[in-house]
Image (spheres, rainbow, N blue to C red):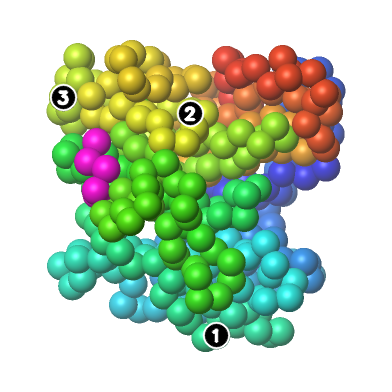
């Protein structure tokens, strides 16, 4: 079994044995898959054995099935500030659609961040760009969120950052500091607000119709466990003032379980703080440890993994492993609903 992680400009493959004890983590030696990449941000495996990698400065690279990094990118855009998340359509095998989150300079376009759909041709080049969502996601070139992923419901989920504006995450009619949920049937309906979104009452025209959850600071990882629950990683404050009870605190990175319509608190609460009507994280790094968690994925052992830097006891970045009660049955939801109880511990390991 294998788990991929992105470390220090390289793609690293963790190839080892996943052991069955709930407290144990992935073991094995990391293997460099590709080097010389510039800020590799998203990794997507293609069914033909190739791998697509976004480089944040504005390129999508191709690792061929034999492991060679192709010199020519699949797509590049010198006008873009950043390429971030990327996802294959659930029907990719038939429609070849790839979705990419691209950020342009806010000074040049108030709808700075958008989702663009491409067709991946047989030579692994991006063709036929169609902007499917450009409704007003602001950018400050830093807190942009930017992860996109298709949920088990076939909808496209998009994380957006607070762009250092504390007023936006609690404003339902801002698209920043949110997790958005979009229709993505693979065609003209892409980018519409699903009728069952939490703030999309009949006839709703405000931006809140796209919002799935809010009160986020800088969410960069989302995935779903075998029970169908959505999880999210979120960067805690870097010392900036906020309006919560304890100002100017750092760290407090979060792992949240995401529910429809819920408020995750930023900037009114952070980390383990609580407030009526707001959700606190399942796990917080506390007020003295920084994870700076990026992506999030559930491994084939059923555990939640997120990159952490600097990992405790490690000389370099290392994934954060969170034991999951579903570890013993990774391929299907457990019959016992109690097995879906929230995990509450995290342990870093050095690859
Ligand atoms: Ca929070």
Q: Which quadrant holds the C terminus?
A: top right
Q: Which residue is mark 1?
A: 127
Quick one: label 1 or label 3, which is nearer the N terminus?
1
Magenta stretch contains residue 213: no
Q: Does the closest atom of ligand 1 sit within 8 Å of the Cβ of label 2?
A: yes
* Relative horizontal placement of residue 75, taking residue 163 as reference (left or right): right
Numbered circles on residues, count: 3
Q: Main secondary structure of the magenta part?
A: loop
Residue 256 disc label: 2
Q: Is mark 1 within 8 Å of ligand 1?
A: no
Asked if disc 3 and disc 2 are in contact, CB closer than 8 Å, the reply is no
**Is disc 2 placed on a helix, strand or loop?**
strand
Location of residue 107 with respect to 202 vertically, above or below: below
The spot of residue 224 in percent (x, y) is 62, 39
Q: CA distance from mark 1 to mark 3?
A: 45 Å
- Is 326 rendered above or below residue 1? above
Quadrant (top left/top right/bottom left/bottom right) for the N terminus: top right
Q: Is residue 242 left or right of residue 349?
A: left
Depicted 80 relative to depicted 182: above or below: below
- Dividing the picture into quarters, in which one does residue 225 lie? top right
In the image, what residue occupies the spot 43% across and 27% down? 254
What residue is pinned by disc 3? 243
Q: Which residues are magenta?
A: 170-174
Does label 2 or label 1 sit earlier along the sequence? 1
Q: Position of residue 256 (x, y in %)?
A: 48, 28
């Amino acid at each position: 079994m294998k788990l991929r992680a992105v470390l220090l400009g390289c793609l690293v493959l963790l190839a080892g044995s996943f052991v069955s004890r709930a407290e144990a983590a992935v073991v094995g030696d990391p293997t460099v898959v590709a080097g010389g990449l510039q800020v590799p941000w998203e990794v997507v495996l293609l069914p033909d054995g190739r791998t697509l990698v976004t480089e944040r400065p504005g390129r999508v690279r191709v690792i061929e099935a034999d492991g060679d990094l192709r010199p020519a990118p699949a797509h590049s855009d010198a006008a873009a500030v950043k390429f971030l998340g990327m996802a294959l359509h659930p029907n990719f095998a038939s429609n070849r659609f790839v979705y990419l989150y691209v950020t342009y300079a806010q000074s040049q376009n108030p709808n700075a961040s958008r989702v663009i759909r491409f067709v991946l041709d047989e030579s692994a080049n991006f063709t036929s760009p169609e902007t499917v969502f450009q409704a007003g996601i602001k950018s400050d070139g830093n807190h942009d969120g930017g992860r996109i992923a298709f949920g088990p419901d076939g909808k496209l989920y998009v994380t957006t950052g607070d762009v250092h504006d504390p007023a936006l995450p609690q404003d339902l009619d801002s698209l920043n500091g949110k997790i958005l949920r979009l229709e993505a049937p693979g065609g003209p309906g892409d980018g519409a607000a699903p009728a069952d979104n939490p703030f999309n009452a009949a006839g709703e025209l405000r931006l809140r119709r796209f919002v799935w959850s809010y009160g986020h600071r800088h969410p960069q990882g989302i995935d779903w466990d075998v029970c169908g629950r959505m999880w999210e990683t979120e960067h805690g404050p870097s010392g900036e003032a906020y309006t919560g009870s304890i100002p100017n605190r750092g760290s407090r990175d979060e792992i949240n379980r995401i529910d429809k319509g819920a408020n995750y608190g930023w900037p009114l609460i952070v980390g383990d703080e609580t407030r009526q009507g707001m959700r606190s994280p399942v796990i917080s790094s506390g007020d003295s440890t920084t994870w700076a968690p990026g992506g999030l994925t559930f491994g084939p052992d059923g555990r939640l993994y997120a990159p952490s830097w600097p990992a405790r006891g490690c000389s370099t970045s290392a994934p954060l492993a969170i034991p999951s009660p579903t570890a013993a049955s990774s391929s299907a939801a457990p019959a016992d609903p109690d097995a879906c109880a929230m995990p509450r511990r995290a342990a870093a390991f050095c690859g």
